[in-house]
Image: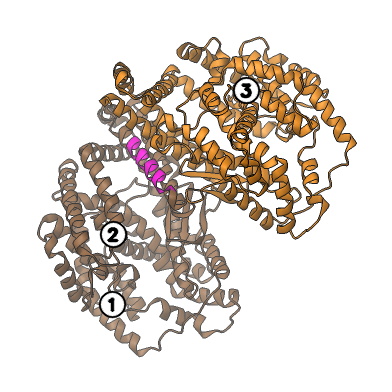
Chain colours: A brown, B orange
Amino acid sequence: MSAAYQKLKERFHTLSALSGADSILYMDSMTVMKPGSEGDRAEQSMAIATAHHKLLTDPAVGDWLAAADADKQNLSAQDRVNLSLMRREWVIATALPEDMVREKARLSLEGNNLHTQYRDAGNWAVMKPIYERAFALSREVGDILKDRLGFATAYEALLDQFSPGLKLATVEREFAALEKALPPMIAEAIDLQGKRPAALPIGDVRLTLQKRLNHNLMMALGFDSSRGLAYNGDMHPLSDGTPDDSRLTTRYKKSDMTEALYTTAHETGHSLYEQGTPRAWRYQPAGHTMGMDIHESQSMVMEQQACKTPEYLSYLSAETSRLFGRPADPALSADNLARTLFHVEPSFIRIYADELTYPGHIILRFNLERDMIAGRINIDDLPDAWNDGMKKTFGIVPPDPSKGHMQDVHWPTLSIGYFPAYTLGAMGAAQFFAAAVKAQPEIRGEIAGGQFKTLRSWLEKNVHGHGSLLTQDQLFTAATGEPLNARHYMDHLSRRYLGHDFKP
Amino acid sequence: MSAAYQKLKERFHTLSALSGADSILYMDSMTVMKPGSEGDRAEQSMAIATAHHKLLTDPAVGDWLAAADADKQNLSAQDRVNLSLMRREWVIATALPEDMVREKARLSLEGNNLHTQYRDAGNWAVMKPIYERAFALSREVGDILKDRLGFATAYEALLDQFSPGLKLATVEREFAALEKALPPMIAEAIDLQGKRPAALPIGDVRLTLQKRLNHNLMMALGFDSSRGLAYNGDMHPLSDGTPDDSRLTTRYKKSDMTEALYTTAHETGHSLYEQGTPRAWRYQPAGHTMGMDIHESQSMVMEQQACKTPEYLSYLSAETSRLFGRPADPALSADNLARTLFHVEPSFIRIYADELTYPGHIILRFNLERDMIAGRINIDDLPDAWNDGMKKTFGIVPPDPSKGHMQDVHWPTLSIGYFPAYTLGAMGAAQFFAAAVKAQPEIRGEIAGGQFKTLRSWLEKNVHGHGSLLTQDQLFTAATGEPLNARHYMDHLSRRYLGHDFKP
């Protein structure tokens, strides 16, 4: 191992630990910190970003990369992957002029503040200039990065920032398949739903009982609470931290115990991914989790797959009946839980959308942001383009921008290229779960008993434990025998909502 | 203002925010974090230290300092102070070779771990090499720093690291006065104590009641809970954080409500100092709190002065009788509270020592560490020198090293030069409190009503609000009319323990 590569490992170790510090401070700010401390926290986060940037763009790093590259034949295959991930980070950090990095941070903060202030009022006149600058600056950033990273378009470079290795061609191909398949599925699901009795309300469940239920699920999913924690209390749901200090929060609703339970399943899935990254590569780029799409697949495999299987709903029915002291309550039957969880109804707001209509919201955003970055749609056309898309996808038009194109924080905070990860994650989750159950059919029986050990081990071995050592294609092919595709997802949706495998 | 000085201000702003991040992470690790996350946290803390060191020793900083010095006549007096504090930090950071800095951090961590493991067993054979290396390395560090900072001896340079601006001559002179005055005072106090009835036990007090009492005190002392917090629960008592995010913890003992109450007074005193630093100098060296001795004076002015005055004890008696629902309980009388709080008894362990014998413990440690650094005592002589000192000071000899020279974590973690701050702080507290009451006699009446507003304002105006803009001598002279000295402290101890002013 060359001295230069050793130096790089030390430097990236420091960088990884700095990012970890920032993650813990972020979780603290969302849980423990008082509002009057926001200024100090923003300064701390900026100082860590400044230090991170300085240490990464230090001229020595460029020299070490050149020297390590020249000596590459003496590195192991995994070290070569690690080296190429180092180079990627360095290219991104050195590609953008300092002024641009600062402006990006500033604009994102401003966008976030204005969004919080003006979203609910749907005040597009105030927000439009921010959206315009966010798209313009993102385009500039994407143009620089596409040249440095070798992409054909600015949007591909932006997509790659959030989900490294995810190809635009994959997104376009699989989204096209979904765009075609989903409308008739939604129509059929609503039709079937109309023929069934409506779900009985589950009713209020005391928070102490909900917390016990959620804690049990977290533990059953395999969360290692000796090196991580769930904050106690009702909070905006989040998961962040480091592999050995993974933290999560849950939102509780007295009248809907499923909200907290599935939030916990989701956030625990994220945490398990962090906790399962390879110890030998800890603090190195190759040891980190992959992009947002893979991260989302690991939350979704728990939330949407394992914990919503018929097997788990049977278990949950028995468990809640016992824990809540409501034996033989029809509201807690597996059938009623399924009717509660699988209700389909087109709606305006993405974050409240059901599983079956959710991808429509994402595909709309993807098409729009890609075309905005490419300059095929301009800011003045955005509201109409949004409403047209909603009409085409769901047959409904939002009554005002707060329920339309202004609802999400992503665009005004320059998270352009992020949205596809949500649906790619759901897709990946279906594919991973199908492969896991195929490889180890005993998983279903375990889940019927409220246990997830074999599933967890399969994920650890086939996903978590690889860190970033594999490309996306390598990861999916090794784990599932095929690259990421929508087939398993459509099968899953068809089975759950239509009662049969997907029929094109 | 020169461009170079502006650059320095930006850089030191980042450094200050990085230190703030580390303080919050430290508080998190002592409160929220799980034990299995210690490794990640240590890496984060080291990464922040590495980044801090890199940014401070960056060659550009030296250039900016030279340029700003050359243009000094154009700076305001306060900016010149800020510039000299910047230079001091830079000199210290650049004085020590990187290997030495790393070895210091490593040895301190090792010393801490071994202390935790072997202290209770009093295993000197295992600990001796660590103590030896700690003193040897500290001597090397002190030797380098004394030349760079212009001190006569290595020990003075070490003392200055913890309590910048505190002169060795002051410590030696005032400690000599105390060393002479205290033994007869202790003897007389014990004699008087023997003639009074023993204190009645206060008995168990529910933690919910104790917490309410403590919360009320924190608020009355003026803690701003919109930008800082007390962690809820029974924890090792601490205060840390940043001016706008000051945090503290309290240790609760069911059978002794005074322990938590005075811990809270102490830690709140620290927090008030942080919260009161000058906003115009936030994130600059001139805006930071001064050294450990001044910090300790601000915790002690609340714990040992204001909250143990006869006026406050009367208030506390009424308040606890009411809150605990124990009217006219003699155990809660002001007299009995005083007898409980002011019990004097020579003992082995510093941290459990009473107020009157405490300085003896510190003076012993000061004499020993100064002579160890000077090479006048060597490691083999340490155990005997300790025991001789205890015999001479208190007439008792510890039964084993765990109750003797091995009891504190300071030496094995290279905090050599720290100890004097405890007693200098107690001394400063007496001097500040006397000056405050003299300037604004209404303070006593307010305290009798459980209020501290005028005292708090006086401290903010005369101490907190100066940040590090004044030297120690300037600070004490401006606030109290004289430099730091033991006279007010001896007066205070005489009045409290002997019932009259100090008579030499």
Q: Main secondary structure of the magenta part?
A: helix
The amino acid on which the numbered mark 1 sits, given as a three-letter code, is Pro
Residue A346 place in picture, x, y as percent: 28, 77
Where is mark 2, residue-wise? A115
Where is mark 1, residue-wise? A346
Quadrant of res A362: bottom left
Q: Are marks 2 and 3 in contact (CB under 8 Å)?
A: no
- Please provide the residue range marked out in magenta: A37-52
Q: Is residue A395 above or below residue A406?
A: below
Q: Given this view, does label 2 or label 3 mark the residue nearer the observer?
A: 2
On screen, residue A413 versus residue B157, left or right, reads left
Separation of residues labelled 1 and 3 (CA atoms): 69 Å
Where is mark 3, residue-wise? B130
Q: Is residue B101 above or below residue B242?
A: above
Residue A287 place in picture, x, y as percent: 39, 43
The amino acid on which the numbered mark 2 sits, given as a three-letter code, is His
The amino acid on which the numbered mark 3 sits, given as a three-letter code, is Ile
Secondary structure at numbered mark 3:
helix
Q: Any magenta on residue B421?
A: no
Q: Are marks 1 and 2 in contact (CB under 8 Å)?
A: no
Asked if badges 1 and 3 are on one and the same chain, I answer no
On screen, residue B376 versus residue A358, left or right, reads right
Q: Any magenta on residue A39?
A: yes
In the drawing, what numbered circle is on residue B476?
none
